[in-house]
Image (cartoon, helix red, strand yellow):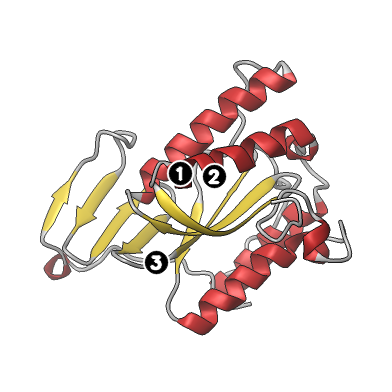
Amino acid sequence: MQFWFFASQHPAQTEVCATTTCCCLPAQVVLISRRRMTYYVRNLPHWQPAGKDVFITWRLNGSLPAHLKIPDSAGRRFRSFDRALDLAAAGPVWLMDPRVATCVVAALHRGQAQEMFCLHAYVVMANHVHVLLEPRIPIARITKIIKGATAREANRILSLTGTRFWQDESFDHWIRNTPQWHRIRAYIERNPVAAGRVQTPEEWPWSSASRTQ
């Protein structure tokens, strides 16, 4: 699939109205805000147009093989990363513990109930999470809150207190059009099938497609 997006340069200075810092982000993060777009950089650039649904992926710390080659193409890069994560051949697979997976699903539903976002689709895999949502607050705040709460609870469940649970940075891609929205939703809910975990999306308990949700 060719929907993954990585920007290679900062926007031109004439394209923005103001540059600000945000208290909810680390000091090295700079927010560039205008009426219709938010852009910030950590290790990766993040473009977040106002009013657009967003596909977000985050993963466990240390879940990608150290020797993994990084393709030049953004689309091939995403496929390479996601295939490696689906194989779950390197690093922790703490999300395979039903107690941990359940706490991540609960945090997503709690975030929607608190009107941080409207949740369209999600899946919790062995070592990563995919979500499709409409943000109601900045995405950096959403991932900080969800990842922080689930890391604390998971570490408590697994007796890993103090362990770095999630990889710091998340990947995000804003949805360009309706056909892409449907492709990405299907991609998320079929991820357990593509990874060989189940025969149908409905069989995976920790997904928006699950019969139990």
Tag 3, which secondary structure? loop
Disc 2 marks a residue whose amino acid type is: His
Between disc 2 and disc 3, the foreground one is: 2
Q: Which mark is residue 205?
A: none
- Hey, what amino acid is under mark 3? Ser
Amino acid under disc 1: Ala
Q: Earlier in the sequence, mark 2 or mark 3?
A: 3
Task: Label 1: state its secondary structure.
Answer: helix
- Report which residue position mark 2 lands on: 109
Relative to residue 50, is residue 23 depicted above or below?
Answer: above
Residue 188, percent across and down? 65, 63
- CA gap, disc 2 and disc 1: 6 Å
Question: Helix, strand, or loop for circle 2?
Answer: helix
Task: Work out whether residue 198 can be spotted.
Answer: yes
Q: Residue at x 35, y 51 (%)?
A: 41
Give coordinates of residue 105: x percent, y percent: 63, 43
* Residue on which disc 3 sits: 8
In three-dimensional space, the C-alpha distance between marks 1 and 3, rounded to whole angstroms, equals 35 Å
**Viewer-closest of 72 and 129:** 129
- Rendered position, 55 above or below 156: below
Q: Is residue 67 left or right of residue 50?
A: right
Q: Quadrant of residue 162?
A: top right
Q: Quadrant of the N terminus?
A: bottom right
Q: Is residue 39 left or right of residue 35?
A: right
The reply to whether callout 2 and callout 1 are in contact (CB within 8 Å) is yes
Read off the residue under disc 1: 113
Is 195 placed above or below 154 here? below
